[in-house]
Amino acid sequence: MPADKGVNRMKIRNLCIFAAMLLAAATVLPVCAADVAANGDLNADGAADKQDVLLLQKHLLTNGTLPADAAAKADLTGDGILNAADLSKLKQLLLKPQQPDQKLQLLWSDEFDEPVLRMSSWSYELGNWKLDASGNYITGGWGNNEQQFYTDQNATVHDGILTIAARHENYTDPVQGSYEYTSARLSTQHKFAACGGRIEVRARCDAGKSLWPAIWMLPEDSIYGGWAASGEIDIMEGWGSTPEKICGTIHFGDVWPNNTYLTNNYEFPAGDSAENWHVYAIEWESGEIRWYVDDVLYSTQREWSSAGHAYPAPFDQPFYLILNLAVGGHFDGVDGIYGDPNTFADGERHFDIDYVRVYDMAGKEMVPSLVTSLPLELYTEGADATLQNRDGETEITVRSPGTLPYGVMGLIRGVSVKAEKTYRLSFDASATVSREMLVTVEDATYQRYLEKTITLTPEQTHYDLELTIPADMQADIKFQLGNLDGASAAAHTVMLRNIQWKS
């Protein structure tokens, strides 16, 4: 069984199960013990370490008796009583670096030292379907054939540990249907994002076919286009069937299916695996990302791209963090799809996270690159067109506009807007033929808050359009280039430059 800061996983579970027993068996320290400093060094070997954790746990679980001086050293809460709170404090003490790297400055962290998940830092991502920026369901299985339904009931915090539990159980959602597995997926989107630095997570995960633990990052704003044009950073992904290895990966290039990736595996020393506690980290600088396990460097990537944009795009923007435990899917599922019920024969499976820490690396700070034009997503219906985003511009080639006004569109989905606030949409536009373009800003029900028809010509023209939206919502910006005048134009190209959306 894996060790948890010197305490094996089964013993931690025993500690949780017998919490009431531990409290009942709490040791009241003698008065004379108050003269001994509570430093966690129970065996007086000069340092608080895993052996001291084992001593205190054994004392609590067996209602044993530590010598008075050792007991006093274990009273880290200072309340004169030894109980599970002191054990938790001792484990947290061991995480603190004795000689912190002066080149690293802690920017953000979660030590999971509160009794519940801190919702100011994390959000639950629910369900089984991947959504677009407008909240529309676009593909099941999170795009990976995953079999679990993510809930807000499969993650708990206990004794300084976040546990994501995957369960083999029936779950039915009125919209998304029925599932045989549940789990949890947490993210810091809209709450914390980092652009560069050292990101490290101490974690362990149960083994078993079809388990897929992941520590990864996605762009806070997909300013270079949809996945994976704006990038993805996988700090750690594990195969439940082969826990003796993990991998670190980046995804980039262009919008799916024209994306690509780079990856490397880390193989643990003989007798070790992802079931044990390890620190997974990346160090991310401009033009270079490095992957580590327990500070052992195993991968360095420097060559990536984002179609139409200058290097080091896309890894020059803020990314947020995700922690999840998937079941099934292409990574480790049975036949690349299914969960393996045998994995859950003796109960739920756990992905345990001790802490998440993000450091600024002194002298290597990154500033997000300035993007002078927002990227557009192509939508076609009964038409033939292509779209290419480049630095400062978007080129839309319309071969056939079809019969619908919205048959060809350049889209910006899911822009957050606030009630009664004035927004300005500005852009430069031209076309190789004279034609109309309809610009709208709409909500999910297609109600329009901006509707402007403009005539494009080969001469580039600047436009500033203002609007006020009456309620908080996610709005879609649409440049409609279908059949607007009843006539099918010959093949032509539309150029949109310097697209900006500002309040």
Image (tube, rainbow, N blue to C red):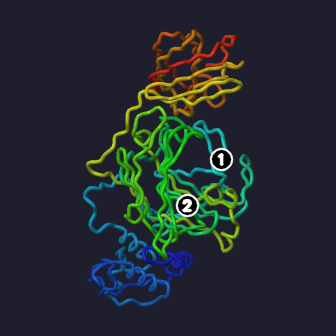
- Which residue is at a point 64% across and 63% down the rendered structure image? 210
Q: Position of residue 50 (x, y in %)?
A: 39, 78
- Which residue is at a point 48% across and 88% down the rendered structure image? 63
Q: Quadrant of the C terminus?
A: top left
Q: Which residue is mark 2?
A: 213
Q: Position of residue 189 (x, y in %)?
A: 49, 46
Left or right: 239, with 147 as reference point? left
- Front residue of 166 and 386: 386
Q: Is residue 9 above or below residue 453?
A: below
Query: Type of residue at label 2?
Result: Pro
Q: Position of residue 256 (x, y in %)?
A: 58, 40
Q: Is residue 52 above or below residue 164?
A: below
- Which residue is at a point 57% across and 55% down the rendered structure image? 185
Q: Secondary structure at mark 1?
A: strand
Q: Which residue is mark 1?
A: 129
Q: Quadrant of residue 317?
A: top left
Residue furthest toward the front? Answer: 303
- Front residue of 421 and 425: 425
- Front residue of 87 and 82: 87
Query: Type of residue at label 1?
Result: Trp
Q: Position of residue 411 (x, y in %)?
A: 57, 28
Q: CA distance from mark 2 to mark 1?
A: 18 Å
Q: Secondary structure at mark 2?
A: strand
Left or right: 313, with 154 as reference point? left
Q: Earlier in the sequence, mark 2 or mark 1?
A: 1
